[in-house]
Amino acid sequence: MKKYFNFDQLGTNYRTETMAGITTFLSMAYILFLNPIILTLDGVELPEGMTRMDSGAVFTATALAAAIGTLIMGLLAKYPIALAPGMGLNAFFAYTVVLTWGIPWQTALAGVLASGLIFIVLTVSGLREKIINAIPGQLKLAVGAGIGLFIAFIGLINSGIVVGNPDTLVALGDLTTPTTLLAIFGIVVTVALMVVGVKGGIFYGMIITSIAGIVVGLIDPPSQVVGSVPSLAPTFGEAFAHFGDIFTLEMLVVILTFLFVDFFDTAGTLVAVATQAGFMKDNKLPRAGRALFSDSAATVAGSVLGTSTTTSYIESTAGVGVGGRTGFASIVTAALFVLALFFSPLLGVVTSQVTAAALIIVGVLMASNLKNIEWDKFEIAVPAFLTVIAMPLTYSIATGIAMGFIFYPITMLLKGKAKDIHPIMYGLFVVFVLYFVFLS
């Protein structure tokens, strides 16, 4: 094992790698409880005839998808990078595809499966990197920031801090409502943990908020802590069963969005983690193809199990920060996700008010991309701003991406920068124009 992972060459050992794996797990364990809340649209009143995903099945699918993806990353790519269903992509899946567009969650899972299969083809052929490079860096930053605002907006709504208003569309909620006060308490605690640099601050914030909710009687205590693993039956294989339903223009936009967001989410995470760990050589990532394949395979596995797109997690930097340098750390993280399967009874204490802080903090972290956008260049500022602002205001990640990708070629052409526009961007311009035509 030491020889396979080159412990001596990388100056590491079993103890350091194990601690790194545990640290990474604690930093991203919140997804085990947050993903079921989002994908089941917990607390959201569904339109008549729309079905809700099974929370237990999503919990199991989340843990298994994370374990499988992280294990493949560790064994194949040999990197200390963990994977799990991605934030932002799960919100797009639930709030845009299912809730807003009325697409059954089974068909949405088929869309995730299709994107994963396309990813594998693009990765093996080497086209994935070329497509990534074709999208302007400024738009990549805008998409990340816009998703951050969208996720934070969901957190504010779930907490009751922001409510609907017939006159102003949204307004400040009643901050004296007990459940809203619990959410505010969670936000304060989580912010405090993050500010002082506690590893896994989001996860610990959820635990503290849940305990506080139980103490004051707002959350029913769990009947047990450890229990049997919830059945996958309600979601397993639904992606295959509904694969024939994806051949529509609407689903094409869904699949493209899954592809686009995961493209840059994974690429950005790989570069960030690899840079921190010192893996980059001549500005290139060794075994990049294997790392990208691990991500693609995890998405396929996750869709079959019953969860949204599985992607590399930036929280892996927490493990690298304590010395993780090899895939053995990922094996440890994967094992902990398997162990977590037996803690499903705790799902009942993780309410939408408890997870509100996690959504808002993740939104803050993603919105940091705003600082790198060239706002002084109007031809860049317009498509970037429309991308960012449209996501929360239209309650749709896809709409924000569409607006940005339509205006970018227009503003660049008017500025006389036609040579700076990659041909792929013209193709995406047509696709997203048709998207708006179809919606109308």
Image (cartoon, rainbow, N blue to C red):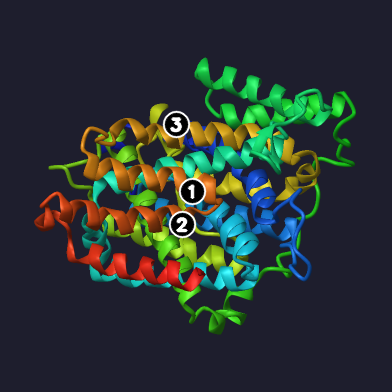
Residue 408: x and y, percent? 26, 53
Q: In the rendered view, does 199 fall on the left or right side of 340?
A: left
First of labels 2, 3 by sequence position: 3
Report the amino acid beneath label 1.
Answer: Met
Q: How many marks?
A: 3
Q: Nearer the viewer, residue 342 or 237?
A: 237
Where is residue 425, by image quadrant?
bottom left
Q: In this figure, which residue is indicated by the disc labeled 3? A: 318
- Residue 391 is labelled as 1
Q: Nearer the viewer, residue 151 or 219?
A: 151
Q: Residue furthest top?
A: 196
Which residue is disc 2 drawn over? 399
User: In the figure, 350 relative to 38: above or below?
Assistant: above
Looking at the rendered structure, the secondary structure element under dot 3 is helix
Separation of marks 2 and 3 at Cα, in angstroms = 33 Å
Q: Is residue 64 visible?
A: no
Foreground tag (2 vs 3): 2
Q: In the rendered structure, which disc, 3 or 1, sits on the residue that comes first in sequence?
A: 3
Q: Is residue 396 visible?
A: yes
Q: Quadrant of residue 316?
A: top left
- The amino acid type found where label 3 is placed reads Ala
At label 2, the amino acid type is Thr
